[in-house]
Image (spheres, rainbow, N blue to C red):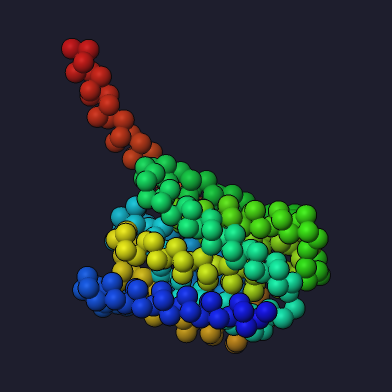
Amino acid sequence: MLIALLVPIVLAGFVQSWLLIRTAIARKALRPRGEAVAVGAATNFFDTLGIGSFAPTLAWLKFRGRVPDRFIPGTMLVSHALPTIVQAVIFLILLGVHVDPALIAGSAIALLIGGLAGAPLALRMRVWVVQIVVATALLIAALLYALSNLDLMPVGGTAASLPIPLMVVAIIGNFLMGVLLNFGVGHYAPSLIMLSLMGLDPRLAFPIMATAGALTVAGVSTRHIPAGNVDLRTAISFAIGGIPAVLIAAFVVKSMSVEMLRWLVIVVVVYAAAVMLREAAKGRAAERAPEADKQTATSL
């Protein structure tokens, strides 16, 4: 079963790499940015430790202002695809043999279907609506982080599998998280908390999250890259910095305490949510302005 999971992940990595490089060459966007390489290394290093990469990536993208808001979700998904695939391979080899394969496969398929179903939805929705969805989800993630750090939420059990009813709930939850991936909302934090609350050993959540994430971001990338809503130079830069960072985090820093880092991530998440809500308010106001002008002209 382990080989059956590894084969599609590796193949997805080759397909995603080929599509990304081919498109970048065609659009003359193959040259990486040094700053983005460093940020990709940092975010994927922390992602491998379970902290997540989407919130700090979003904060950096908003701070730098190089990527249009509508391109941010697609750019984040494509940027973290290859590092996440490397994560999946490592965690499956190290921990995958201890986890119920049905739970891994079901979660991965559900997240992938949700990601594919949500891709066209994200492309059609108004920018400020996407921003509100992302900001709200980020604030929820920040609250869950805080509750976990304050020991107000269970840290998880010791199980390697789940009863069928809870497994069904976990699969449905992964589908919904897959949809949210298209809005720039990472699934590591909610997945880790959800599975821990269900009694799974938190360590065994990593191969589940990484496998599901790898297949999904690779699959969804094939929708976003041709659509042109991706900053290709940023995506390539993140992949260049992220892959070696994942290897270091997985094999060298296994026992590193991440409690302080989780508090820092909470600050980043709240900041990113606040920025998105501010931009959403501006976008909604700008959208309403022409309508108000039209109504004024009609009344005159």
Residue with the most extreme top position: 300
Q: Quadrant of the C terminus?
A: top left
Left/right placement of residue 152 relative to residue 143 reads right
Residue 83: x and y in percent read 48, 76
**Residue 103 is drawn in which quadrant?**
bottom right
Q: Is residue 118 above or below residue 192?
A: above
Q: Is residue 160 above or below residue 300?
A: below
Q: Quadrant of the N terminus?
A: bottom right
> Residue at point 37% right, 61% down?
224
**Residue 62 is drawn in which quadrant?**
bottom left
> Residue at point 24% right, 76% down?
25
- Total numbered labels: 0
> Residue at point 53% right, 85% down?
247
Judge whether residue 24 can be spotted in this image.
yes
Q: Is residue 16 above or below residue 126?
A: below
Q: Is residue 285 above or below residue 26?
A: above
Q: Nearer the viewer, residue 207 or 251?
A: 207
Residue 152: x and y in percent read 75, 54
> Residue at point 64% right, 68% down?
105
Left/right placement of residue 34 relative to residue 91 reads left
Residue 195: x and y in percent read 71, 61
Left/right placement of residue 65 relative to residue 39 reads left
Residue 58: x and y in percent read 43, 59
Judge whether residue 145 can be spotted in this image.
no
